[in-house]
């Protein structure tokens, strides 16, 4: 007998399947882009309710009035930007970019993404005296 528990009220994307053995499988489903799955745009979903950290050196910018596409472009065109987060229901349109060293802050209403298609910025030439 397999039992399936779904948490539609609090966690609509979470299901737990319990088999007669001791194995437990947790299934997470996300609509549109799944976590870790590449989009055709050059980024993957890192997680929901996550954003670039507040008052942290890893945050490279914070700009209001952005869409998912424009936020992605801002990160792609910013040297050192590896992740970006966008306010969806909380602070809609607020875009933040952050570096490789990011540890996301939990913040309901934001969605975080990871760039998988990085721009190759020119390496500065060494300074000669």
Image (tube, rainbow, N blue to C red):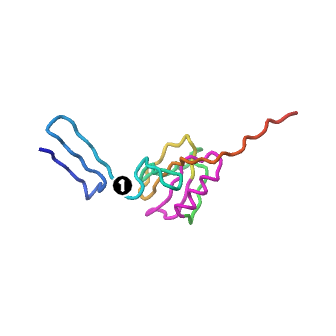
Neighbor class of circle 1 (other Cα within 10 Å; few <14, some 14-19, many 20+) is few
Residue occupying the point 30% across, 54% down: 11
Label 1: element kind: loop
Residue 116: % across, % down: 53, 47
Residue 73 is a magenta residue? yes
Which residue corresponds to the image point at 57% horizontal and 63% vertical from the top-left? Answer: 64
Circle 1 is placed at which residue position? 30
Q: Position of residue 30 (x, y in %)?
A: 36, 54
In the orientation shown, which residue stands out farthest toward the front? 40
The relative height of residue 9 versus residue 44 in the rendered view (above or below) is below
Does 114 appear in magenta?
A: no
> Which stretch appears magenta?
67-96
Return the x and y of residue 90 as percentages of the image width and height: 45, 62
Residue 99: where, in percent of width, then height? 58, 44
From this view, report whether residue 18 is shown above or below residue 86.
above
Q: In this orientation, which residue lies closer to the viewer: 21 or 102? A: 21
């Amino acid at each position: 007998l397999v039992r399936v528990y779904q948490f539609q009220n609090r966690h609509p994307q979470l299901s737990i399947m319990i088999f007669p053995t001791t194995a437990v499988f947790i299934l997470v489903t996300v609509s549109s882009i799944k976590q870790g799955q590449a989009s055709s745009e050059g980024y993957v979903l890192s997680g929901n309710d996550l954003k670039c950290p507040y008052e942290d050196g890893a945050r490279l910018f914070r700009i209001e009035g952005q869409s998912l596409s424009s936020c992605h472009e801002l990160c792609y065109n910013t040297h050192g930007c590896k992740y970006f987060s966008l306010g969806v229901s909380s602070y809609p349109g607020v875009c933040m970019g952050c570096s490789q060293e990011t540890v996301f802050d939990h913040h309901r209403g934001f969605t975080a993404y990871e760039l998988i298609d990085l721009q190759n910025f020119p390496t500065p030439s060494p300074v000669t005296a």
